[in-house]
Image (tube, rainbow, N blue to C red):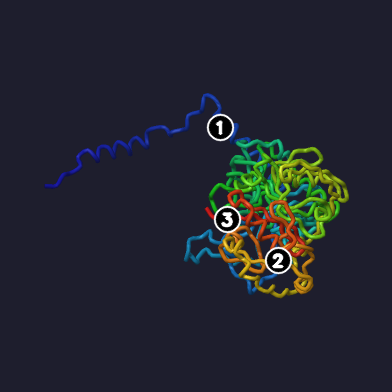
Amino acid sequence: MILRPRIAFPLVAFAMVSAFTAPPLRAAEPATASPLQGINDGLVAVFEKVAPAVVVIEVEKKADPDAAESAPSPFDFFFREPPGSRPPGDRRFRMPAPAPQSEGSGFIVRADGFIYTNNHVVDGAEKITVKLRDGRKFPAKLVGADERTDIAVIRIDSKDLPVAELGDSDAARVGQIVCAIGTPFNLDYTFTLGVISAKGRSNLQPDITYEEYIQTDASINPGNSGGPLFDIHGRVLGMNTLINGINRGLGFAIPSTMLREVGEALIRDGKIVRPWLGVRIQSLSESADLREHFAGVKAGVVVRTIEAGTPAFKSALRPADVITKVDGVPVTSARDLQKEVLRKKVGQKLELEIWRAGESKTIPVVTGQMPDDLSTLAARSGERSQPPAGDEEKEDALSAWGLQVQDLTRELMQSLEISAEGGALVSDVAAESPAAVAGLQVQDVITEVNGKPVADAAALRKAIAAADPAKGILLLVDRQGEKTYAVLKRAK
């Protein structure tokens, strides 16, 4: 039996008649303006205010035929598509790295053509072209760059350009609305919205010395590098620099206070001159093991290594000292110490208050000028021969630690180019042993155990045998001129 729709035709006919006879429908006029209209107009206005000062930076780099796609990193630059951001095996979207041609962003800070961007955007560029929002293009020259903050300044030959206003990132608050403009995936002048998720983020990039990022959930992607992160008034609070993956809402921007300081110095001098002490440090709060070992001090910065020939090397400062104050100002983190030292001038004397073996001391240090290439400090002067193996019959006190040592003779000092006088030479470190976990290396010279000097291998064995392993054994080490320390602990 077939059921026929008897009602359908009258309904259709009624609809057709109504369509011709009824007056056209119009949207009802709101009695009052929508409360969202003000927000809408405000966002449009802030985009129109900032966008003219934002530029697209086209970069041509020399292609490296031997370059392969780099391994995925936890934090990837915006400038290129991060490796590993595409599904495995999806070759349609895979991009070679580094690309000889690519785009980044920047923003104009002076009407006579000075532009802030990221160092990694223009690093190694053979040709830089800047495109303005009105479509004009200009060749650009590199004024100066700072690898340690990833800030660069370029310039174009033009006048009366629109300028972005730098705001005060120190006054910015977590939760406040921020916007971004950039060139993600070659899509010029993309505008996105979010909030400040956190401030003072650090330890995100191993090759960046000075970090204090603003974290945001504003959508930013490869190509946003160097673009502005700004508030609802159009004031730039940061420069978008770093992301953690694609579409995760984890973006990071260099704060405007750092941008202003570094950028003005680059415009003025073309380079950055910084004071330094020559130490590698770690915040006491970052490690439970450190807090356990330095239980006598509540907060501070632990001196892990003192570079050879540096201002700190020439002072009475020692590895495993905990710096608690700089010229009377408390420091509780590595960033605090960096800030206080950077406030000084090269050649200026400062007083470090330190904690050492349960006692507070004050140590004067005269700052020096940070060298351009820190890697040269760690470079070895030629290949060194392997030290002969230690006397295994005398290693009973050290075998449990995976460590072998021997006396540091004058002949060994000459052949291995070791400058330390006194101590015990590490001749072998067993893989995955407590000594290896502590970071000890072959050719290290152990000079102290728990604050007491050791003259030779026998003294070292005796001191370690007498130490309480439950508390950890603090060793002072001379490593090719550097001074550092290691803590021997039993595996849990």
Residue 74 badge: 3
Q: Quadrant of residue 245?
A: bottom right
**Mark 2 neighbour density, 10 Å: few (under 14) some (14–19) many (20 or more):** many
Identify the element where label 1 is drawn.
Answer: helix
Q: Is residue 135 among the parts visible in the rendering?
A: no
Residue 43 lies, with reference to residue 62, above or below; the image says above
Q: Mark 2 or mark 1, which has the lower sequence index? A: 1
Q: Position of residue 334 (x, y in %)?
A: 70, 47
Query: What residue type is disc 3 on?
Result: Pro
Q: Helix or strand or loop: what does disc 2 sit on? A: strand
Would you place residue 281 above or below residue 230 in this image? below
Cα–Cα span, label 2 and label 3: 38 Å
Separation (CA) of disc 3 from disc 1: 38 Å
Q: Are marks 2 and 3 in contact (CB under 8 Å)?
A: no
What label does residue 12 carry, if any?
A: none
How many C-alpha atoms fall within 10 Å of the one at disc 1: few (<14), some, or many (≥20)? Answer: few
In the drawing, does residue 58 fall left or right of residue 490?
Answer: right
Camera-side residue: 265 or 379?
379
Q: Which tag, 3 or 1, sits closer to the chain's start? A: 1
Residue 425 bears which disc, if any?
2
Residue 223 placed where, x, y %? 63, 55
Q: CA distance from mark 2 to mark 1?
A: 73 Å
What secondary structure is found at the residue carrying circle 3?
A: loop
- Dividing the picture into quadrants, the one containing residue 214 is top right
Please state which of the two labelled residues, at mark 2 or mark 3, is closer to the viewer.
2
Give me the disc on residue 36: 1
Mark 1 is on which residue type? Answer: Leu
